[in-house]
Image (tube, rainbow, N blue to C red):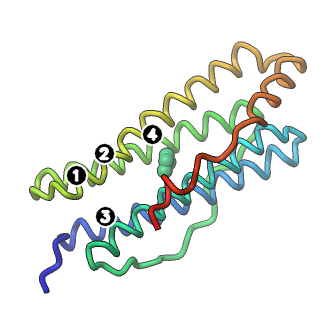
Amino acid sequence: MKLRLSEKIQQLLNEQLNKELYSAYLYLSFADWYDDYGLRGFANWFVVQASEEKAHAMRIRTYLLDNDVKPVLEPIAAPQKQVSDPANGIELAYEHECFITDSINQIYTESVNEGDYRTKKFLEYYIAEQQEEEITCIDMMDDMKLFGVTPEGLFALDEKYGSRVAASTSAEMPR
Ligand code: OFO
């Protein structure tokens, strides 16, 4: 049977699966930093983010399998970015999200060029998700500039981020 996804799309999606798992790993390391620093609310926010990243990886896994492609699970690299202070973790997250957005856009461009409208449609979820995540990081960077500069403000932000809960996994993880 002829596979519906080109070699190139398969390869890019496999790489993206790895990048999503790496994102989970990276954000878990950020959560560790905040937890160790004493900001448990920020740590919670990053733990929830890590679980969302894993859900993004799972969606790609499902898509590949639904198209008769066995995912290739490559090693996940150790986190490359180290948090240096409470505001820095958010800035690093924003940088990383921009990197992921570029990566998704690259696969989207390839799918358009190939006329692979199935993959193009699949990727629309990720395009919307990336926009949302970049905006969230920008809002958090603003929060830090406005309120994170005093202990009271930082305490309030920690409470706010501590209330984040994971989105329903049934919508995120189709299998
Ligand atoms: Fe996977 O959502 Fe951003 O990175």
Count of residue discs: 4
Q: Secondary structure at mark 2?
A: helix
Q: Residues within 10 Å of mark 1 (few under 14, many from 20)?
A: some
Q: Is mark 3 within 8 Å of ligand 1?
A: no
The image position of residue 44, as x and y in percent, is 76, 44
Looking at the image, residue 84 sits to the left or right of residue 55; the answer is right
Q: Earlier in the sequence, mark 4 or mark 3?
A: 3
Identify the residue at horizontal 52%, vertical 58% (top origin): 55
- Name the quadrant of the N terminus: bottom left
Location of residue 68 in the rendering, given as x and y in whole percent from the top left corner? 27, 79
Q: CA distance from mark 1 to mark 4?
A: 19 Å
Residue mark closest to the camera, 1 vs 3: 1
Which residue is tagged 4?
A: 98
Front of the two marks 1 and 4:
1
Q: Residue at x 39, y 63 (%)?
A: 60
Q: Amino acid at mark 1?
A: Lys
Find residue 81 and report its horizontal and vertical position in percent.
Answer: 63, 50
The residue under the point 21% across, 73% down is 7
Which residue is identified by label 1? 120
| Alpha carbon distance from label 4 to label 2 | 16 Å
Per the image, the residue denoted by label 2 is: 124
Q: Is disc 2 surrounded by few (<14), some (14 to 19) or many (20+) residues within 10 Å?
A: some
Q: Are marks 1 and 4 in contact (CB under 8 Å)?
A: no
Amino acid type, mark 2: Glu
Q: CA distance from mark 3 to mark 2?
A: 15 Å
| In the image, the residue with mark 1 has its CB under 8 Å from the nearest atom of ligand 1 | no
Quarter-wise, where is residue 2 in the image? bottom left
Mark 3 or mark 2: whose residue is earlier in sequence: 3
Residue type, numbered disc 3: Leu
Nearest to the eye among marks 3 and 2: give it: 2
Q: Which mark is residue 12?
A: 3
Callout in the foreground (4, 2): 2
